[in-house]
Image (spheres, grey):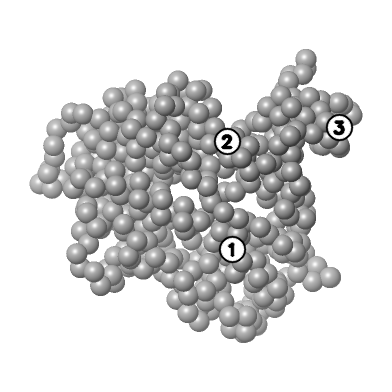
Amino acid sequence: MSRTVTLTIDDLGARGDGLARTDAGPVFVPYTLAGETVTAIADGKRAALLSVKQPSADRIEPVCVHFETCGGCALQHMDRAAYRAWKAGLIGRAFAAHGIDADCVQPAHFCDPYSRRRAVFSAIKTDKGVLLGFQQAASNHVVDITECHVITPEIDAARPAIKALLAAFLPAAKTVHVTVNQTRSGLDLAVDGEIKPDDELKRAASEATREQGFVRLSVNGEVILAPKRPLVTFGDVTVSPPPGAFLQAVPAMEEIMAGLVTGHMAKAKRVADLFSGCGTFALRLAKASAVHAVESDGPALDALDRAFRENPDKRLRPVTTERRDLVRRPMTAHELRVFDGVVFDPPRAGAEVQAREIAASTVRRVAAVSCNPETLARDLAILIQAGFKLKSVTPVDQFIWTPHLEAVALLERAGGKKRHWSDM
């Protein structure tokens, strides 16, 4: 039963919500800060903020008019220094829960506003036109944004053009998701939802794609029109990603992560790149190592393989690919015996089963990349228990004003029988 309460915020939770410890248990209040006294409507463990009676010294004015409504940012009300300290501290909190020493955690890297090259908008066609933005928290309501301080200026400026394109073929009252990737050749749009445009609507969509200057439009995986080839670069290798491809959010942060991974693997003759995607790490690693890239997404693997084969630099070491669901069927310790190093970059759920196989293998070097400190800590604990030493962990914040945090963990262990290509 909902009730109006006055709460004192004791801390920030892992999701960025204020945490009030009460006699009835913890209550989480979004958009609050530690030390504040607030009035809120509480319903069990969750509460909606009504007013801030005593603000924190770390509270500032949000930069965006849509803050607290669009469902995107969670921490624009927090001073930059306090935000960065809290964000970097997420690793230490997660490690403490798994008994991992945090002494090896390095200074964090932080992205700037207006730097995210990938956005997933929600959109719906109404009597008043197309609404394009993000879905309000805990709601299906699409907030029609007029500004965004997270995405690149190029994507932000393209919002009217995206609306015009969608107006040409979207049915009324159907919410769709629009993935926009900024590539070297232009903006690449992938629309996904319960829609089935007929041939006439596809022609209208094609014409609008040309008129608005987008390099590609796909609907539910089907390419409607691609006037240009979308291109991104991983190191020195050019890749044409598939529709809606996952890309690291901020190119400058990707370079930092890639430098850590490739530096750690510099002496490895053969590396397994697990959850490889389109080749963010694999194609860079191939400068020094033979690479086996494993991924469940077939189009992503095809893009990686095509990029390797079409690359004019013949000095790259061999890159092989394997389509495989590593969550259900991880590479076994026996299969990993021929690799000197392993890189893994799983989804937020982590790679617990795969980590257990790596732990049982003879692999000497591991680079673990994660966007979830909690599952990263769990997976690292498995490797540490098996004899790996955690050399460093570098937080990389490419999700500004959110509780999401990327990190690169580098591990080594002594021993292990050396293997050769002939052992395959």
Measured from the top left, where is residue 208 in percent x and y?
A: 64, 81
Residue 53: mark: 3
Q: Nearer the viewer, residue 97 or 178?
A: 97
Q: Secondary structure at mark 1?
A: loop
Mark earlier in primary sequence (1, 3): 3
Q: Secondary structure at mark 2?
A: helix
Q: Secondary structure at mark 3?
A: strand
Q: CA distance from mark 1 to mark 3?
A: 36 Å
| Residue at the spot of label 2 | 85
Residue at left offset 57%, top offset 54%: 112
Q: As shown in the figure, which amino acid type bears the numbered disc 1? A: Thr
| Residue at the spot of label 1 | 152
Mark earlier in primary sequence (3, 2): 3
**Can you see residue 163?**
yes
Q: CA distance from mark 1 to mark 2?
A: 25 Å
Q: Residue furthest right?
A: 4
Q: As shown in the figure, which amino acid type bears the numbered disc 2? A: Ala
Q: As shown in the figure, which amino acid type bears the numbered disc 3? A: Lys
Residue at left offset 51%, top offset 56%: 250
